[in-house]
Image: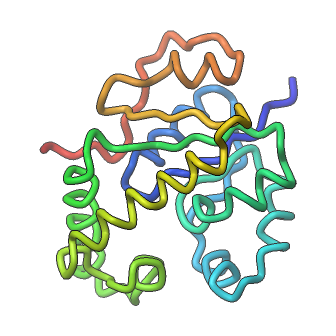
Amino acid sequence: MKLRKVIGVGLPKTGTSSLQSALKLLGYKRFAGFDMDDCMKYLRGDIEPLVAKMETRDGAQDWPWPLLYQPLYRAYPDALFVLTLRKDEDAWCASMQAHAELKRKLVRPPGMRQHIYGYENPADNPQHHIDHYRAHNDRVRDYFSGKGQLIEACWENGDGWEVLCDALALPVPADDFPHANKRND
C-alpha cells in the first residue's frame, strides 16, 4: 500500500516529534527532518532541491519543512498537511525557551531560530516569538482554507490517533499515541 505523504507544518516545539513517532508506528519510514544543509538551501531561496527531496520521503517535519507548505502543496497536492499546535502560546514559548537554553549549554552555533525569528534565544523577546507563532499558524490556515488537505492537532489537548488516522483513512493502532520529548510543565 502506498502511503499518503504527511508534511508537518507546525513550528518546532509543537509536537512535531510526536507526529513523526506516530507516523513511524503507522508504517512511515523515510522522513525529512531538521537538516542544516536543507535549512541553508531554504534561506538561500534554493527551494527546488527541497521539494524534489520529498519525492523519496514519506513525510517531513521540523526546519525547514513548516515554511515550505506552499511549494510542497503545489508539488504534492494529495499530501496531508498537519498543523501541530501547543495548548496555548505561552506553553509553546516556554518550550522554545527551554530548548534554546539546552542548545546554548551545548555550545551549538546559531540555528534556524536566529534566521527565522531574529533571535537565537526566545527569552530575549518572547512576545516577538509568540507573534510569529500566531502569524505562521494564521498564514497556514489561510493558505489551506477550502483545500481540505490540512488538519490541526494539539496532542496536549487530547488529539491523537483518531484525528490522524481519520485523515489518513488508516486504522487506529492499539498502541498509545506517542508523546515524544514530553516535558513536565
The furthest residue to the left: 185
Left or right: where does residue 111 sit relative to residue 126? right
**What kind of colouring is applied to the model shown?**
rainbow
Q: Position of residue 82 (x, y in %)?
A: 58, 40
Left or right: where does residue 88 sit relative to residue 83? left
Q: How many marks?
A: 0
Q: Position of residue 51 (x, y in %)?
A: 81, 64
Q: Position of residue 72 (x, y in %)?
A: 77, 56
Identify the residue shown where x is 25% and y is 74%.
Answer: 122
**57 vs 39: above or below:** above
Asked where in the image residue 49 lies, by quadrant, the reply is bottom right
Q: Position of residue 41 (x, y in %)?
A: 70, 82
Asked where in the image residue 104 lies, by quadrant, the reply is bottom left
Observer-nearest of 176 and 155: 155
Observer-nearest of 76 and 37: 76
**94 vs 44: above or below:** above
Q: Quadrant of the C terminus?
A: top left
Identify the residue shown where x is 30% and y is 87%.
Answer: 107
**23 vs 159: above or below:** below
Left or right: where does residue 78 sit relative to residue 38? right
Asked where in the image residue 38 lies, by quadrant, the reply is bottom right
Identify the residue shown where x is 19% and y is 59%.
Answer: 94
Q: Quadrant of the N terminus?
A: top right
